[in-house]
Image (cartoon, rainbow, N blue to C red):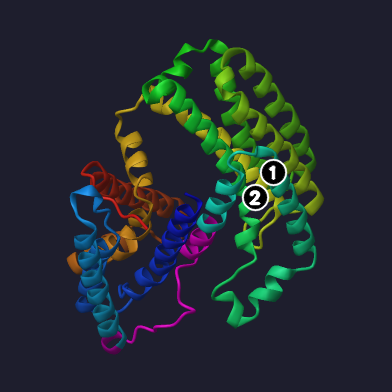
Amino acid sequence: ITGQYVRETFERFGMLWLFSYLYVFLNFSTEQGWWPQFFTLVGFLLLFLFYYSYGKRFSARKVLVYRGLGMAAIIALITVGHFAFGEVISIYRSGIIIFLLAFLYLLGALLWYFTRDNLGVRFLFFVGLVLFSAIAMDLDLQPKLYAVKEIRWFFNMEYLYFLMILLPATYIGDVVYNRISVNGEEEFLKQPGKASWHYYIVLALMLLYIIWLMVALYKGMFVENLVVSVLIPVIVYFLSSRSVPWYNNQLKLATLLSVSGAMAVLLEGSVSKSPCTIGYCLTTAAISVYFLMLLDFIVLKSKGSFFVRIFSGAGANPLMSYVTFGSFLMPLFKITGLVYIYNAAYPAGYPWIGVIRAALVVLLTMAIVARASENKIFWRA
Protein backbone atom coordinates (compact mmCIF):
# COMPACT_ATOMS: atom_id res chain seq x y z
CA ILE A 1 0.00 0.00 0.00
CA THR A 2 2.81 2.41 0.86
CA GLY A 3 4.48 1.96 -2.52
CA GLN A 4 1.19 2.49 -4.36
CA TYR A 5 0.33 5.60 -2.33
CA VAL A 6 3.76 7.16 -2.90
CA ARG A 7 3.64 6.36 -6.62
CA GLU A 8 0.15 7.86 -7.03
CA THR A 9 1.19 10.91 -5.03
CA PHE A 10 4.12 11.57 -7.35
CA GLU A 11 1.87 10.98 -10.38
CA ARG A 12 -0.59 13.63 -9.15
CA PHE A 13 2.30 15.96 -8.39
CA GLY A 14 3.56 15.49 -11.95
CA MET A 15 0.13 16.24 -13.39
CA LEU A 16 -0.18 19.39 -11.26
CA TRP A 17 3.35 20.47 -12.17
CA LEU A 18 2.55 19.97 -15.86
CA PHE A 19 -0.73 21.87 -15.50
CA SER A 20 1.18 24.90 -14.14
CA TYR A 21 2.91 25.12 -17.53
CA LEU A 22 0.17 24.03 -19.91
CA TYR A 23 -2.44 26.59 -18.92
CA VAL A 24 0.16 29.36 -19.29
CA PHE A 25 1.38 28.16 -22.70
CA LEU A 26 -2.22 27.75 -23.94
CA ASN A 27 -3.34 31.25 -22.96
CA PHE A 28 -2.88 33.73 -25.81
CA SER A 29 -5.62 36.12 -24.66
CA THR A 30 -3.21 39.00 -23.98
CA GLU A 31 -2.45 39.19 -27.70
CA GLN A 32 -4.43 41.50 -29.96
CA GLY A 33 -6.89 40.13 -32.46
CA TRP A 34 -9.62 37.56 -32.72
CA TRP A 35 -7.52 34.48 -33.49
CA PRO A 36 -5.52 34.46 -30.24
CA GLN A 37 -8.80 34.54 -28.30
CA PHE A 38 -10.22 31.71 -30.37
CA PHE A 39 -7.16 29.53 -29.88
CA THR A 40 -7.20 30.26 -26.14
CA LEU A 41 -10.73 28.86 -26.00
CA VAL A 42 -9.57 25.83 -27.98
CA GLY A 43 -6.72 25.35 -25.50
CA PHE A 44 -9.18 25.50 -22.60
CA LEU A 45 -11.28 22.78 -24.23
CA LEU A 46 -8.22 20.62 -24.91
CA LEU A 47 -7.41 20.63 -21.21
CA PHE A 48 -10.64 18.68 -20.76
CA LEU A 49 -9.23 15.75 -22.72
CA PHE A 50 -6.13 15.57 -20.55
CA TYR A 51 -7.48 16.46 -17.09
CA TYR A 52 -11.09 15.27 -17.23
CA SER A 53 -11.96 12.74 -14.53
CA TYR A 54 -13.15 9.85 -16.69
CA GLY A 55 -14.22 7.62 -13.81
CA LYS A 56 -15.06 3.94 -14.03
CA ARG A 57 -17.19 4.33 -17.16
CA PHE A 58 -14.03 4.33 -19.25
CA SER A 59 -11.46 1.58 -19.40
CA ALA A 60 -7.84 2.37 -18.55
CA ARG A 61 -6.95 1.90 -22.22
CA LYS A 62 -9.55 4.41 -23.41
CA VAL A 63 -8.42 6.95 -20.82
CA LEU A 64 -4.83 6.53 -22.00
CA VAL A 65 -5.88 7.02 -25.63
CA TYR A 66 -7.96 10.13 -24.88
CA ARG A 67 -5.22 11.69 -22.79
CA GLY A 68 -2.64 10.84 -25.43
CA LEU A 69 -4.75 12.52 -28.10
CA GLY A 70 -5.30 15.47 -25.80
CA MET A 71 -1.59 15.91 -25.15
CA ALA A 72 -0.79 15.63 -28.88
CA ALA A 73 -3.36 18.33 -29.66
CA ILE A 74 -2.06 20.50 -26.81
CA ILE A 75 1.52 20.26 -28.09
CA ALA A 76 0.32 21.14 -31.60
CA LEU A 77 -1.59 24.19 -30.32
CA ILE A 78 1.36 25.38 -28.22
CA THR A 79 3.52 25.11 -31.35
CA VAL A 80 1.01 27.19 -33.31
CA GLY A 81 0.95 29.77 -30.54
CA HIS A 82 4.73 29.96 -30.48
CA PHE A 83 5.12 30.60 -34.22
CA ALA A 84 1.90 32.54 -34.87
CA PHE A 85 1.65 34.70 -31.75
CA GLY A 86 5.22 34.70 -30.43
CA GLU A 87 4.31 32.76 -27.30
CA VAL A 88 7.50 32.12 -25.32
CA ILE A 89 8.06 28.50 -24.32
CA SER A 90 10.39 28.28 -21.35
CA ILE A 91 10.82 26.35 -18.12
CA TYR A 92 10.78 29.75 -16.39
CA ARG A 93 7.17 30.46 -17.48
CA SER A 94 4.91 28.58 -15.12
CA GLY A 95 1.81 29.52 -13.16
CA ILE A 96 3.40 30.28 -9.80
CA ILE A 97 0.33 29.46 -7.68
CA ILE A 98 -0.31 26.03 -9.22
CA PHE A 99 3.44 25.37 -9.14
CA LEU A 100 3.43 26.19 -5.43
CA LEU A 101 0.34 24.09 -4.75
CA ALA A 102 1.89 21.13 -6.57
CA PHE A 103 4.85 21.10 -4.19
CA LEU A 104 2.63 21.70 -1.16
CA TYR A 105 0.48 18.77 -2.23
CA LEU A 106 3.53 16.52 -2.64
CA LEU A 107 5.13 17.41 0.68
CA GLY A 108 1.85 17.57 2.60
CA ALA A 109 0.52 14.27 1.26
CA LEU A 110 3.74 12.43 2.10
CA LEU A 111 4.03 13.99 5.56
CA TRP A 112 0.41 13.15 6.34
CA TYR A 113 0.77 9.55 5.16
CA PHE A 114 3.87 8.75 7.17
CA THR A 115 2.53 10.44 10.34
CA ARG A 116 -1.15 9.48 9.99
CA ASP A 117 -0.98 7.14 12.97
CA ASN A 118 1.25 9.33 15.14
CA LEU A 119 0.14 12.91 15.77
CA GLY A 120 3.05 13.39 18.15
CA VAL A 121 5.55 12.91 15.35
CA ARG A 122 3.57 15.26 13.10
CA PHE A 123 3.53 17.90 15.84
CA LEU A 124 7.29 17.55 16.39
CA PHE A 125 7.82 17.95 12.66
CA PHE A 126 5.65 21.08 12.74
CA VAL A 127 7.69 22.55 15.62
CA GLY A 128 10.89 21.70 13.76
CA LEU A 129 9.50 23.36 10.64
CA VAL A 130 8.75 26.57 12.57
CA LEU A 131 12.27 26.61 14.04
CA PHE A 132 13.84 25.92 10.64
CA SER A 133 11.73 28.69 9.06
CA ALA A 134 12.79 31.16 11.75
CA ILE A 135 16.47 30.42 11.09
CA ALA A 136 16.07 30.47 7.30
CA MET A 137 14.18 33.78 7.40
CA ASP A 138 16.79 35.32 9.68
CA LEU A 139 19.52 34.28 7.21
CA ASP A 140 17.48 35.52 4.21
CA LEU A 141 17.83 32.15 2.50
CA GLN A 142 14.68 32.57 0.41
CA PRO A 143 15.76 35.74 -1.47
CA LYS A 144 19.29 34.39 -1.86
CA LEU A 145 18.09 31.17 -3.46
CA TYR A 146 15.43 32.95 -5.51
CA ALA A 147 18.11 35.20 -6.99
CA VAL A 148 19.63 32.12 -8.66
CA LYS A 149 17.66 31.68 -11.88
CA GLU A 150 18.66 28.04 -12.28
CA ILE A 151 17.12 27.24 -8.87
CA ARG A 152 14.02 29.42 -8.67
CA TRP A 153 12.28 27.87 -11.69
CA PHE A 154 11.93 24.64 -9.71
CA PHE A 155 12.39 25.39 -6.00
CA ASN A 156 11.33 28.22 -3.74
CA MET A 157 12.03 28.21 0.01
CA GLU A 158 8.47 29.43 0.57
CA TYR A 159 7.24 25.95 -0.42
CA LEU A 160 8.53 24.87 2.99
CA TYR A 161 7.29 27.97 4.82
CA PHE A 162 3.70 27.45 3.66
CA LEU A 163 3.72 23.97 5.17
CA MET A 164 3.12 25.85 8.43
CA ILE A 165 -0.41 26.39 7.06
CA LEU A 166 -0.80 22.98 5.47
CA LEU A 167 0.28 20.75 8.35
CA PRO A 168 -2.41 22.07 10.75
CA ALA A 169 -4.88 21.61 7.90
CA THR A 170 -4.03 17.90 7.70
CA TYR A 171 -5.02 17.53 11.35
CA ILE A 172 -8.30 19.38 10.79
CA GLY A 173 -8.96 17.15 7.80
CA ASP A 174 -8.51 14.07 9.98
CA VAL A 175 -10.88 15.47 12.62
CA VAL A 176 -13.60 16.33 10.10
CA TYR A 177 -13.21 12.98 8.34
CA ASN A 178 -13.59 11.12 11.64
CA ARG A 179 -16.71 13.12 12.53
CA ILE A 180 -18.30 12.31 9.19
CA SER A 181 -17.28 8.65 9.44
CA VAL A 182 -18.86 8.28 12.88
CA ASN A 183 -21.99 10.40 12.41
CA GLY A 184 -22.55 10.35 8.66
CA GLU A 185 -22.62 13.47 6.50
CA GLU A 186 -26.19 14.47 7.33
CA GLU A 187 -25.76 14.02 11.08
CA PHE A 188 -22.46 15.86 10.82
CA LEU A 189 -24.29 18.88 9.42
CA LYS A 190 -27.11 18.64 11.96
CA GLN A 191 -24.84 18.64 15.00
CA PRO A 192 -24.63 22.46 15.30
CA GLY A 193 -28.43 22.55 15.36
CA LYS A 194 -28.37 20.87 18.78
CA ALA A 195 -26.39 23.71 20.31
CA SER A 196 -27.67 26.18 22.88
CA TRP A 197 -27.50 29.97 22.70
CA HIS A 198 -23.84 29.65 23.68
CA TYR A 199 -23.21 28.45 20.14
CA TYR A 200 -24.40 31.72 18.64
CA ILE A 201 -22.16 33.67 21.00
CA VAL A 202 -19.26 31.46 19.91
CA LEU A 203 -20.02 32.15 16.24
CA ALA A 204 -20.28 35.89 16.86
CA LEU A 205 -16.96 35.92 18.73
CA MET A 206 -15.27 33.97 15.93
CA LEU A 207 -16.47 36.46 13.34
CA LEU A 208 -15.55 39.40 15.56
CA TYR A 209 -12.06 37.98 16.04
CA ILE A 210 -11.51 37.51 12.31
CA ILE A 211 -12.58 41.11 11.66
CA TRP A 212 -10.31 42.28 14.46
CA LEU A 213 -7.34 40.49 12.88
CA MET A 214 -7.97 42.17 9.53
CA VAL A 215 -8.00 45.61 11.13
CA ALA A 216 -5.30 45.14 13.77
CA LEU A 217 -2.74 43.53 11.47
CA TYR A 218 -3.36 46.12 8.76
CA LYS A 219 -2.85 48.98 11.22
CA GLY A 220 0.13 47.38 12.94
CA MET A 221 -1.57 47.02 16.34
CA PHE A 222 0.60 44.05 17.25
CA VAL A 223 0.66 44.43 21.06
CA GLU A 224 -3.10 44.90 21.24
CA ASN A 225 -3.51 41.96 18.89
CA LEU A 226 -1.56 39.69 21.24
CA VAL A 227 -3.90 40.56 24.11
CA VAL A 228 -7.04 40.03 22.01
CA SER A 229 -5.61 36.84 20.48
CA VAL A 230 -5.28 35.35 23.95
CA LEU A 231 -8.63 36.52 25.34
CA ILE A 232 -11.11 35.80 22.54
CA PRO A 233 -9.83 32.34 21.47
CA VAL A 234 -9.70 31.19 25.11
CA ILE A 235 -13.24 32.49 25.76
CA VAL A 236 -14.46 30.84 22.55
CA TYR A 237 -12.88 27.54 23.57
CA PHE A 238 -14.43 27.44 27.05
CA LEU A 239 -17.88 28.49 25.83
CA SER A 240 -17.72 25.96 23.02
CA SER A 241 -16.54 23.10 25.25
CA ARG A 242 -19.86 23.33 27.14
CA SER A 243 -22.28 23.85 24.26
CA VAL A 244 -20.67 22.39 21.11
CA PRO A 245 -18.06 19.89 22.34
CA TRP A 246 -17.60 18.36 18.88
CA TYR A 247 -15.53 21.46 18.03
CA ASN A 248 -13.09 20.95 20.91
CA ASN A 249 -10.25 19.55 18.82
CA GLN A 250 -10.57 22.24 16.16
CA LEU A 251 -10.70 24.99 18.76
CA LYS A 252 -7.69 23.70 20.66
CA LEU A 253 -5.66 23.98 17.48
CA ALA A 254 -7.18 27.35 16.54
CA THR A 255 -6.35 28.74 20.00
CA LEU A 256 -2.77 27.49 19.79
CA LEU A 257 -2.35 28.96 16.31
CA SER A 258 -3.94 32.28 17.28
CA VAL A 259 -1.74 32.83 20.33
CA SER A 260 1.48 31.63 18.72
CA GLY A 261 0.68 33.58 15.56
CA ALA A 262 0.13 36.81 17.50
CA MET A 263 3.39 36.26 19.39
CA ALA A 264 5.26 35.65 16.14
CA VAL A 265 3.82 38.79 14.55
CA LEU A 266 4.91 40.84 17.56
CA LEU A 267 8.43 39.39 17.52
CA GLU A 268 8.82 39.72 13.74
CA GLY A 269 7.43 43.25 13.72
CA SER A 270 5.41 42.71 10.54
CA VAL A 271 3.07 40.32 8.79
CA SER A 272 3.52 39.45 5.14
CA LYS A 273 2.71 36.66 2.70
CA SER A 274 5.64 37.38 0.40
CA PRO A 275 8.24 37.54 1.76
CA CYS A 276 6.58 35.03 4.04
CA THR A 277 6.56 35.49 7.81
CA ILE A 278 5.85 32.91 10.49
CA GLY A 279 3.14 35.10 11.98
CA TYR A 280 1.36 35.23 8.63
CA CYS A 281 1.31 31.43 8.30
CA LEU A 282 0.15 30.71 11.85
CA THR A 283 -2.49 33.45 11.87
CA THR A 284 -3.79 32.43 8.44
CA ALA A 285 -4.11 28.84 9.63
CA ALA A 286 -6.08 30.00 12.69
CA ILE A 287 -8.41 32.12 10.56
CA SER A 288 -9.01 29.14 8.29
CA VAL A 289 -10.07 26.95 11.21
CA TYR A 290 -12.51 29.57 12.49
CA PHE A 291 -13.91 30.10 9.00
CA LEU A 292 -14.45 26.36 8.66
CA MET A 293 -16.66 26.34 11.75
CA LEU A 294 -18.55 29.42 10.57
CA LEU A 295 -19.16 27.72 7.24
CA ASP A 296 -20.43 24.66 9.11
CA PHE A 297 -23.24 26.85 10.44
CA ILE A 298 -23.90 28.53 7.08
CA VAL A 299 -24.19 25.19 5.29
CA LEU A 300 -26.57 23.94 7.98
CA LYS A 301 -28.88 26.93 7.57
CA SER A 302 -28.77 27.29 3.78
CA LYS A 303 -27.44 24.09 2.27
CA GLY A 304 -29.36 24.45 -1.00
CA SER A 305 -28.83 28.19 -1.49
CA PHE A 306 -27.20 29.63 -4.60
CA PHE A 307 -24.11 30.85 -2.76
CA VAL A 308 -23.49 27.57 -0.94
CA ARG A 309 -23.92 25.66 -4.19
CA ILE A 310 -21.47 27.78 -6.18
CA PHE A 311 -18.88 27.79 -3.40
CA SER A 312 -19.07 24.02 -2.92
CA GLY A 313 -19.23 23.36 -6.65
CA ALA A 314 -16.28 25.59 -7.50
CA GLY A 315 -14.32 24.24 -4.54
CA ALA A 316 -14.84 20.70 -5.79
CA ASN A 317 -13.23 21.64 -9.12
CA PRO A 318 -10.11 23.65 -8.17
CA LEU A 319 -8.12 23.26 -11.40
CA MET A 320 -11.03 24.35 -13.56
CA SER A 321 -11.84 27.19 -11.15
CA TYR A 322 -8.32 28.54 -11.40
CA VAL A 323 -8.19 28.93 -15.19
CA THR A 324 -11.82 29.51 -16.22
CA PHE A 325 -11.66 33.29 -16.03
CA GLY A 326 -8.37 33.80 -17.88
CA SER A 327 -8.72 30.96 -20.37
CA PHE A 328 -12.48 30.99 -21.00
CA LEU A 329 -14.30 34.11 -19.85
CA MET A 330 -11.74 36.74 -20.86
CA PRO A 331 -11.25 35.50 -24.45
CA LEU A 332 -15.02 35.10 -24.70
CA PHE A 333 -15.46 38.70 -23.51
CA LYS A 334 -13.01 39.89 -26.18
CA ILE A 335 -14.64 37.91 -28.98
CA THR A 336 -18.16 39.11 -28.11
CA GLY A 337 -17.18 42.70 -27.28
CA LEU A 338 -18.25 42.37 -23.65
CA VAL A 339 -14.71 43.34 -22.69
CA TYR A 340 -15.62 47.00 -23.34
CA ILE A 341 -18.36 46.82 -20.72
CA TYR A 342 -15.96 44.97 -18.41
CA ASN A 343 -13.31 47.70 -18.77
CA ALA A 344 -15.85 50.51 -18.43
CA ALA A 345 -16.93 49.06 -15.09
CA TYR A 346 -13.63 50.16 -13.54
CA PRO A 347 -13.59 53.97 -13.89
CA ALA A 348 -10.49 55.81 -12.75
CA GLY A 349 -10.77 57.20 -9.24
CA TYR A 350 -13.50 54.77 -8.15
CA PRO A 351 -11.69 51.68 -6.82
CA TRP A 352 -14.75 50.33 -5.00
CA ILE A 353 -16.59 50.00 -8.30
CA GLY A 354 -13.67 47.90 -9.47
CA VAL A 355 -14.03 45.75 -6.35
CA ILE A 356 -17.72 45.18 -7.13
CA ARG A 357 -16.82 44.31 -10.73
CA ALA A 358 -14.23 41.80 -9.56
CA ALA A 359 -16.69 40.24 -7.11
CA LEU A 360 -19.34 39.81 -9.81
CA VAL A 361 -16.86 38.27 -12.25
CA VAL A 362 -15.62 35.88 -9.58
CA LEU A 363 -19.20 34.83 -8.79
CA LEU A 364 -19.86 34.31 -12.51
CA THR A 365 -16.73 32.17 -12.81
CA MET A 366 -17.70 30.15 -9.75
CA ALA A 367 -21.24 29.65 -11.07
CA ILE A 368 -19.90 28.28 -14.37
CA VAL A 369 -17.56 25.85 -12.63
CA ALA A 370 -20.22 24.86 -10.09
CA ARG A 371 -22.58 24.01 -12.94
CA ALA A 372 -19.90 21.75 -14.40
CA SER A 373 -19.45 20.10 -11.00
CA GLU A 374 -23.19 19.52 -10.62
CA ASN A 375 -23.08 17.76 -14.00
CA LYS A 376 -20.24 15.52 -12.73
CA ILE A 377 -17.64 17.21 -14.94
CA PHE A 378 -14.40 17.40 -12.98
CA TRP A 379 -10.75 18.04 -13.72
CA ARG A 380 -8.37 15.97 -11.66
CA ALA A 381 -4.59 15.77 -11.55
Q: Is residue 89 left or right of residue 225?
A: left
- Vertically, is 227 above or below 58? above
Say which quarter of the image contains residue 50. Answer: bottom left
Q: Nearer the viewer, residue 319 or 70?
A: 70
Question: SS at mark 1?
Answer: helix
Rendered location of residue 244, percent (x, y): 56, 17
Say which residue appears at 76% left-offset and 44% top-offset.
222
Say which residue appears at 56% left-offset and 36% top-offset.
172
Rendered location of residue 93, percent (x, y): 45, 77
Numbered tag placed on residue 164 in the rendering: 2
Rendered location of residue 345, percent (x, y): 34, 57
Q: Nearer the viewer, residue 176 or 264?
A: 176
Q: Is residue 270 left or right of residue 361?
A: right
For badge 1, the amino acid type reads: Val
For mark 1, what is the residue?
A: 121
For badge 2, the amino acid type reads: Met
Q: Please identify, in this view, whether the residue under mark 2 or under mark 1 is nearer the observer.
A: 1
Say which residue appears at 80% left-offset and 63% top-offset.
138
Please count the marks in the image.
Answer: 2
Rendered location of residue 149, percent (x, y): 59, 82
Which stretch did the figure color magenta? 83-104
Question: SS at mark 2?
Answer: helix
